[in-house]
Amino acid sequence: MTQVFLAAQALRILGTLHDWLFGTSFRVLCYHAVSNAQRFSQHMAVLNRSAEVLGLGQLLAEKHKHHSLSTRPRVLITFDDGDPSVLDRAAPVLASHGMPSALFVVTDWIGSRTEPWWVTSSRAWQQNSNLEIHGQRFSSSQALIARLKTLPDTDRKTFVSEHVSASRPARNPEWSELSAAMKQGMEIGAHSVSHPCLDMCSAEQVQREVSGSIATVKKQLGFAQVAFALPNGNFNPDALQAAAEAQASSVFLFDHRTMPASQLNASMPLISRLRMDDYASIWRFVFIASGWHSRIYHLIRRDTQARALRNS
Ligand SMILES: [Zn+2]
């Protein structure tokens, strides 16, 4: 408990200092599956003591408002992909604190036993580290996944279909379970139809993935407008256009940045997010949620890229 108390104070101080230096920001956290429920509970306990946790609708309602410097960081908690653990492990913790959140679902996976293609691919590499794509072998499962992200979408699908396991035990949440989660403050958005790498898809495919998933969420849950989260963090102009045509309320990025309040004012705001792991230690959580991890990460990246350009 003492640790949670100290971490909450640290988050308030570091967050305020960050916003004083860089401008008032929202912190939109992006989780995926929640395998470590205990760590996740600690993260939420820190937020409960330090932050103002907003829902998706509440965040968008902050448009065109004046935001003065606050000692309580304003946070939106989001989850991508719709893993069963979000409803099984994260939702009860959030409900116990009365915290809202947003879940972005892959519409073809709902109610199915489909597992994310990168999980299938990672297991395939662990079972056979000599597997090849076009004669290339990989030093790690991450290297394999990085290569798959650069393949034409049909080639990636072929690889995944050849390695899919028939016996996945976990079933993804049904629409009825998502409706029940909404009653506890979890808002639902779209995250494509099948989670491809949009930058490796044709324009028609991008259109189908974006507008198809938005239309399905609208129909199943009775929404007038839906937020869309870009899969794999691919920033893709065709996807933004498709989201605008489908009248998405907002598009969620995966850029590991805090979100300046002014960024909300666009007609379809692009929402920056901080990547958060459910197993991050309490101090790493504070470092990321305060915004300082993102500042240093992008500073180092910029420096590395500049050096690479100078040397090329
Ligand atoms: Zn995703």
Image (cartoon, grey):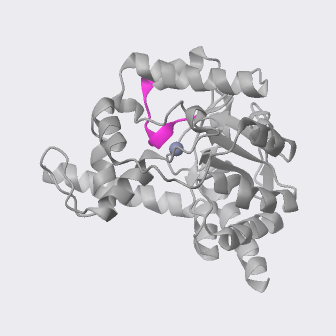
In this rendering, the answer to whether 56 lies above or below 277 is above
Taking the view exactly as shown, the residue that stands out farthest to the bottom is 2
In this rendering, the answer to whether 68 lies above or below 130 is above
Taking the view exactly as shown, the residue that stands out farthest to the front is 166
| Residue at x-position 36% and y-position 26% | 201
Res. 18 in view: yes
| Residue at x-position 72% and y-position 57% | 88
> Within the magenta stretch, is there residue 269?
no
Return the residue nearer the eye: 193 or 102.
193
Return the residue nearer the eye: 271 or 37.
37
Res. 51 in view: no
Q: Quadrant of residue 170?
A: bottom right
Q: Quadrant of the N terminus?
A: bottom right
Q: Tell me where residue 213 appears, x and y as whole percent.
A: 59, 26
| Residue at x-position 58% and y-position 14% | 245
Q: Is 149 placed left or right of 267 in the picture?
A: left
In this rendering, the answer to whether 95 lies above or below 287 is above
Q: Is 198 placed left or right of 30 in the picture?
A: left
In this rendering, the answer to whether 72 lies above or below 239 is below
Q: Is 199 placed left or right of 189 in the picture?
A: left
Magenta residues span: 229-238
Q: Tell me where residue 293 appears, x and y as whole percent.
A: 52, 63
> Within the magenta stretch, is there residue 230?
yes
Return the residue nearer the eye: 180 or 255.
180
Q: Is 294 placed left or right of 40 in the picture?
A: left
Q: Quadrant of residue 73?
A: bottom right
| Residue at x-position 82% and y-position 54% | 99
